[in-house]
Amino acid sequence: MNIPSASCDIQNVPNHVAVIMDGNGRWAKKLGLPRVAGHKKGVDTITSLLPICRKRKIPYLTLFAFSSENWRRPPAEVNLLIELLSSTLESEMRRLDENGIRLRVIGDVTQFPKRLQSRIRQACELTVDNDVLNLTIAINYGGQWDITQACKAIVEGMKAGQIENQEITPSLISSFLSTKDLPEPDLFIRTGGEKRISNFLLWQLAYTELYFTDTYWPDFDETCFDETLTEFAGRQRRFGKTGDQIVKFK
């Protein structure tokens, strides 16, 4: 397989990559380590991926860090994940700002401890003017929740006379989603061997290219990422058109 170099054609690089970072616990179990060791190693993978995205000129990266279903995990693991989120924000927010990375957080953060909510606000406010890389972290997020809260907001707008029935279009619905300020993902990656999207960005992934790999997230390095980009570059995105139409208008 040909691996793209740092100077790969910008036209073949996705504008927005969305990732389910799966396999942390299984990676740790394979090595005889506690699951939390896998989650900590997964954070290292995130920090190493950010400069790679900058080098490949990928402006948008969205990571699924904590789903609305993750509350079903053992309480001890949930508490460790929350503490890891909090400590990572505290230790990394300055580095994000220094490297021109803007942080957004999507999801219902009201269920998290006040300290974590405060750190989320601080990190997002600190980096709000950065534009080298747009990093979005989804925590306590679910695609069904996202669509539901958008529908509720639209209903409230209709009750207030601000929205008419005929104005409800896919574009209007998108404008009420938590990702309203982001372009739709071009490439979705899930590590860890599972082949499903698990309630992540259900509306937004309508025309996204899907890529699944058996590699656990802690092992997902630059070579793995470049293999994914190569696969993406070789695909023909038709958006409902025929292949001949796409070739004709290139």
Image (cartoon, helix red, strand yellow):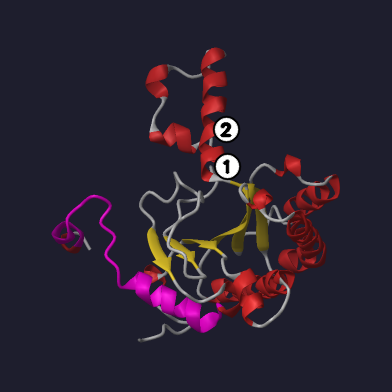
The residue drawn where x is 69% and y is 81% is 32
Residue 50 is covered by the magenta coloring:
no
> Residue 209 location in percent, x, y?
37, 61
Q: Is residue 88 above or below residue 158?
A: below
Crowd rating for badge 1 (residues with CA inside 10 Å; few <14, some 14–19, many 20+): many
> Which disc, if any, is residue 14?
none
Position of 235 with respect to 23 (left or right) is left
The residue drawn where x is 78% and y is 61% is 80
> Which disc, if any, is residue 178?
1
- Residue 59 can be seen, yes or no: yes
Q: Amino acid at mark 2?
A: Gln
Label located before the other in sequence (1 or 2): 2
Crowd rating for badge 2 (residues with CA inside 10 Å; few <14, some 14–19, many 20+): some
Position of 110 with respect to 13 (left or right) is right
Mark 2 = which residue? Answer: 149
Range of residues picked out in magenta: 220-246
Q: Quadrant of the N terminus?
A: bottom left
Q: Is residue 211 above or below residue 109?
A: below
The residue drawn where x is 81% and y is 63% is 87
Q: Amino acid at mark 1?
A: Ser
Q: Disc 1, disc 2: CB below 8 Å?
A: yes
Q: Nearer the viewer, residue 28 or 202?
A: 28
Dot 1 falls on a residue whose secondary structure is loop
> Residue 145 location in percent, x, y?
56, 39
The furthest residue to the right: 115
Viewer-nearest of discs 1 and 2 = 2
Dot 2 falls on a residue whose secondary structure is helix
> Residue 212 location in percent, x, y?
43, 68
Q: Nearer the viewer, residue 242 or 114?
A: 114
